[in-house]
Amino acid sequence: MHSIKHPGKTIGDFCRPDQMALVVYDMQIGIMRQMPDGAGITARVLSILTAARASNFPVIFMRHMSMPLALMGAFQRRQAMALAKDRRSGRHQATVSQRKRRLRDRA
């Protein structure tokens, strides 16, 4: 039987720059402009980014990127077509609002 070893009791014991990194995902201007509190989100991310850099945590920036139609696989093309249809019908914004409500309700 294996025992679980607990490395510590404080957040500093668990948050170690040699074992963790901060991943910042999809902080593109176009995405943030679509968010009702985009400026607030950007400010909070900047605060976390500043703290991570001050503590020597590696920082990784990622973004979602769609490929040009000619290079897309079948699945990605279907997803892009469905999203374009939702945006034209206004359903996309409703979906974003529903996700935000669910996240708020979980908090």
Image (tube, rainbow, N blue to C red):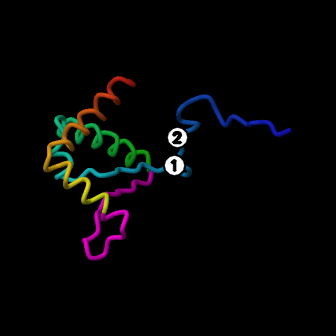
- Give the mark nearer the N terminus: 1 vs 2: 2
**Picture coordinates of residue 84, whole percent (x, y):** 19, 55
Give the Cα distance between marks 1 and 2: 7 Å
**Picture coordinates of residue 31, whole percent (x, y):** 21, 49
The quarter of the picture where residue 3 lies is top right
Give the answer, above or below, for where 107 lies relative to 94. Answer: above
**Picture coordinates of residue 90, whole percent (x, y):** 15, 43
Q: Residue at x 31, y 57 (%)?
A: 79
> What is the three-letter code of the residue carrying label 2?
Cys
Give the answer, above or below, for where 90 lies relative to 104. Answer: below
Q: Residue at x 29, y 52 (%)?
A: 26
Q: Is residue 12 left or right of residue 53?
A: right
The answer to whether marks 1 and 2 mark residues whose Cβ atoms lie closer than 8 Å is yes
Query: Judging from the image, what secondary structure is the residue with disc 2 in?
Result: loop
Query: Judging from the image, what secondary structure is the residue with disc 1 in?
Result: loop
Q: Which residue is mark 1?
A: 20
Q: Which residues are magenta?
A: 57-77
93 or 30: nearer the eye? 93
Q: Which residue is mark 2?
A: 15
> What is the three-letter code of the residue carrying label 1?
Met
12 or 32: nearer the eye? 32
Q: Residue at x 56, y 50 (%)?
A: 19
